[in-house]
Amino acid sequence: MISLEKRTLGIAGLGLMGGALARALRGLPKPLFRILACDTDLAAAEGALREGIIDEAADPAAMLPRCDLIFLCLNPSTLIRFLEQWEASFKRAALLTDIAGIKGNICAAAERLLDRRPDLDFIPGHPMAGAEGGGFANSGLVNFAGKNYILTPLKRNREENLSFLKTLIRSLGFGRITETSPEDHDGKIAFTSQLCHVIAASLIDCETDREITRYGGGSFEDLTRIAMLNASMWTELFLENSGRLLSRISRFEKSLEELKTLIAEGKEEALRERLAAIRDRRSGM
Amino acid sequence: MISLEKRTLGIAGLGLMGGALARALRGLPKPLFRILACDTDLAAAEGALREGIIDEAADPAAMLPRCDLIFLCLNPSTLIRFLEQWEASFKRAALLTDIAGIKGNICAAAERLLDRRPDLDFIPGHPMAGAEGGGFANSGLVNFAGKNYILTPLKRNREENLSFLKTLIRSLGFGRITETSPEDHDGKIAFTSQLCHVIAASLIDCETDREITRYGGGSFEDLTRIAMLNASMWTELFLENSGRLLSRISRFEKSLEELKTLIAEGKEEALRERLAAIRDRRSGM
């Protein structure tokens, strides 16, 4: 696939990211393509139709045989079941890509699909963008501008498809595309994304006072905004990547314990030096 | 004091907050008052003069006898020494206020000053705003609009001074003023501010890869921005409030440990329920 012109795009799952992708795709200049979408949530599909960001809502059986390019915007476990269930329905030579926040199991599922349907191509991806709340209702809040997009290409991905997808991703506003292995992705994301969500959740878990925001100066708000999460999706992401995540939590706990000890022992100079080194490291990132 | 008209304002300390206050005060309509400032950092004072946000840079001995209202914008320990050193120099019946992020020791120092100078008034305060980096150079980045401002008034504060200061704070753009005790302030701030800074610092402390931002989707950036902190000031704040802060760290560690256990044991349903409850609590805050 080398161009969207006169093609049919499919979006499976009109949640936060599916909705955001539909909006961004619809906003492309020269949109000489159709966008179909399926979602078990009829309200999301109807909303997307009403807003004009998709051309047609259909069930997978009707949609998949017509789509040249499909964005699979489903929770990981749902995505894996979806691939198995609809394996025979994808259009010949279609290009598939997904948006899941974990890549090891998705890449394995993609390989299994391509073993049985070698005419297809499937490039696993992870757009690093989000918004508070989740779901189609909040999808208009997602901003792709300048954001990171990770791709974990398979060895058998076709060069022209990879090149096409990267051009499309850039045209949606993303600022940086990184290609890496699923193992590297899942290791890094355990830190930058999953650990951060566990920390935000723990911060809210340990405070019951709803009036506490009277005492917020921005840092509490910044650190806990992502605690307004999609509980089902994050449960899947945490459990599917639990080994790496638990190791990251432990490393964080060790650092926290060390700072705690410096504070408890009143080690003024050592604490100041440690904080200055941390400030410098973060500034350099 | 009931009006700024024809008054002289003093700012002791042109760091991040002193500089930000000078800018906001200078921007008030009808600025029929003079702003003097002192800082041991001559570059900050010269910068403020050059930008026209202060009328005069002076040393405390020359400045304090002329000021009707003084914003003390110094680190806590420096502030306490400053009050002792310049006790005799404050203008008769002057109104003092500070911006320190901890209030117990500052309120005690204010009481000592007022014991010896009962003509003065001192209303301790904490504007809950900041910016990355710190120092006068970053003071233009501080935004007061809609932010919280905590006051911990002393019993002997004069009603007209408190009322005047609150009007002035609102005119600077702050959205909500909360009056409370120094104990309550220091307890709440240990959570909303200090714990958040300890967590952000620990997150950076446990990761050495400077390229990790390629894998950031916003949450890592949001959770660690405040790790670019003023090491001296935060060392003072952490150590001065260490009892409350350590207790807050422990409560956070307990919540983190509980989430970690749910993840380690693969308790899918319990984890999903816990995350959903956390999302709802944060949404209600």
Image (cartoon, coloured by chain):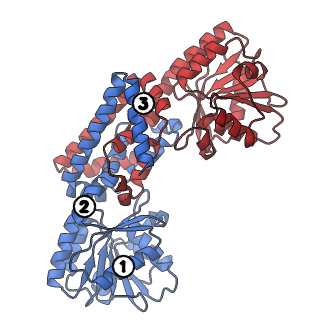
Chain colours: A blue, B red
Disc 3 residue type?
Arg
Location of mark 2 (residue): A184
Disc 2 residue type?
Asp
Q: To which quarter of the image does residue A163 belong?
A: bottom left
User: Which sits earlier in the primary sequence, circle 1 or circle 2?
Assistant: 1
* Residue nearest the viewer, comparing A138 with B82: B82
CA distance for labels 1 and 2:
21 Å
Secondary structure beneath dot 1 equals: helix
Secondary structure beneath dot 2 equals: helix
Residue at 59%, 27% in the rendered image: B74
Location of mark 1 (residue): A165
Horizontal side of A50 relative to B60 (left or right) equals left
* Residue nearest the viewer, comparing B213 with B171: B213
Horizontal side of B150 relative to A5 (left or right) equals right
x, y percent for residue A133: 42, 57
User: Which sits earlier in the primary sequence, circle 3 or circle 2?
Assistant: 2
- Tags 1 and 3 both on a single chain: yes
Do the CB atoms of the residues marked 3 and 2 lie less than 8 Å apart?
no
Horizontal side of B137 relative to A264 (left or right) equals right
Q: Nearer the viewer, mark 3 or mark 2?
A: 3
Residue A123 in the image: above or below residue B232: below
